[in-house]
Amino acid sequence: MGQQIVNGLFLGSIYALFALGYTLVFGVLDILNLAHQAVFMICAYVALVLVVHLHMPMFAALPVAVLAGGLMGIVVDRVAFKPLRGRSDSNIAGLISSIALATILEAAVLQVFGPDVERFPFGAVPTRSLKIGGAVVSELQIVIIAIALAMLLGLTWLLRRTRLGRRIRAVAESPKAARVLGVDVDRVIAASFFLSSALGAAAGVLFGLAFNNVAPDMGRSVELKGLAVIVLGGMGSMPGAALAGLALGLLEVFTVAWIGSSYRDAVAFGVLFLVLVLRPRGLLGSAALREA
Amino acid sequence: MSLESLQDLWLTYQSTVAFIGLNGLLALSVYTTLSCGQLSLAQAAFMAIGAYASAILTFHTQAPFAVNLAVATLAPALVAIPLGLPVLRLKGVFLAIATIGFGEVVRIFFVNLDFTNGALGLTAVPQRTSVWMIYAALAGALFVLWRIRGSRVGYALEAIREDEPAARTMGIHAARYKLAMLALGASFAGLAGALEAHYTFMVAPGTYSFTRVVDMLVYAVVGGTSVFYGPVVGATFLTALPEVLREISSRVGLAPGPLRLFVNGVVLLLVILFLPEGISSLPRRVRAWLRARREAHAA
């Protein structure tokens, strides 16, 4: 039981990290960025290259990969979203242009690395484990949960207390009003994309480490799980996404333990579907604008 | 060209021709729900329902193929109606997400049920589909959509797409129309699923994933969703493209898989940014451009 909870929290903290970035952009722009999973995947490769080919230690490679992810986020905004802003169909058009960009990025990775799974070299990750109560916790799990928690708190602080955070919240509330008040909306959006993709990048590296598995299609399944998480948490709600990420992690682990691994994914999507039908604003969502 | 070389050509490209038809039908299934402004991404699940229904009927009954196809067309529509009642209240992206969730749940159940043979799917499905049947189905779907356009129903759908509250104020029963279009789109997908299963000899649950729906949506968008035949144009273009690319990739020395993905992504991005009405709007655009140039010359 204790072991399941530890495993669930561990998996959930990665989901939460991925979903935080997802939901940040949705909160600001009301647009789903389906290229988020491509950034997640590519940054795992960035960390892998840094560790394997440049022999960087993991603790140095992670921030570099996160920075690379952030910059990639700005590119995603420039290429896939900025040109569509102001168009009446920008909601669905943005969905599609981000799918296009994700396809291009995935093709690039496939060309360079091939479709096979790559692994971090032995020793790149801490392998020791310790016992807490009845549960075996690996050092890696502790580090991952700690990093996820630190990034969540950092983001909360940034949004609540800093100038940039205030501007982001203003644009999320109403881009028009923010512009009238002298906020450079385009820059705030670019900054949101930077933050969002940096979080996605961190999630990608940690996911790659956690399962020691980096592959071109690693983002696909997490993308759909991430959708489930942000819907469950309430679209655009950061604390909601964090909470829902942990909840989904626990739910999956317990589904595997009690029902069997084949229904693990059905739980995530079943929850997603039921939440949208029964309580469209999710756990902590505020505005109830999902319906007409 | 001799008769023999024509025959060779047909054998080489027969499956491409078949898949152009199937993908066209699938693109139309996405378009049908999109025509009243609703983006449903459950089409792969509807396709799976059609494919399993038809293949299982073939295995266990002696029913003629036409009966199987009819069942495969009706069954997804019957599933779409109870799905649509709660889900179609959602808007835009939320509807898309809910239908993704539904689609994945359906796929996972097919993977885990016994009578569908789990993750392996159904194999050795007898081949009963000929290429002409695929094109007959496609023609049928196009005919239905063509009849809808310009009719009372067509105008109602356009009104709902442009401004739903306004359409409702004018007495258009929006919920009923949206549900009907979801069911119609579902039946197109189911029919395509059955035809594909009996063409490729198998029903593999892995092929009914989110990726497949994205493909259908891409066909529709690249072709253009402002006219009813646009999605077929897009499906034709993007299905035939890999054949051309295979030639190119062997010369440039790039692997064909990544190159195909890359070109698909680039085409999609260019279309959505610069040709929002899809490549089916190209002739009209070129004509308009030529006319403008002529007038500039005359002046």
Image (tube, rainbow, N blue to C red):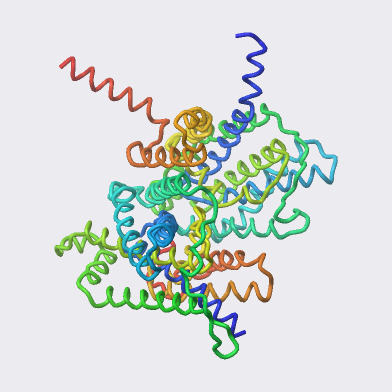
* Left or right placement of residue B239 versus residue B294 in this view: right
Q: Please give the name of the residue rendered at 51% of the width and 57% of the height, measured from the top-left corner.
A: A118
Decide: is A253 above or below A194: below
Q: Residue A193 location in percent, x, y?
A: 31, 60
* Left or right placement of residue A221 versus residue A27 in this view: right
Q: Please give the name of the residue rendered at 70% of the width and 35% of the height, measured from the top-left corner.
A: B199
Q: Please give the name of the residue rendered at 48% of the width and 32% of the height, measured from the top-left corner.
A: B249
Q: Is residue B150 visible?
A: no
The quarter of the displayed image where residue A206 is located: bottom left
Looking at the rendered image, the quarter that the C terminus of chain B falls into is top left
* Left or right placement of residue A153 versus residue B37 in this view: left
In the foreground, B250 or A283: B250
The number of numbered discs placed on residues in the rendered structure image is 0
Q: Is residue A250 visible?
A: yes
Looking at the rendered image, the quarter that the N terminus of chain B falls into is top right
In the foreground, A213 or B126: A213
Q: Residue A198 location in percent, x, y?
A: 34, 64
Q: Residue A125 location in percent, x, y?
A: 47, 71
Q: Residue B244 location in percent, x, y?
A: 50, 28
Farthest residue to the bottom: give it: A133
Decide: is B10 above or below B147: above
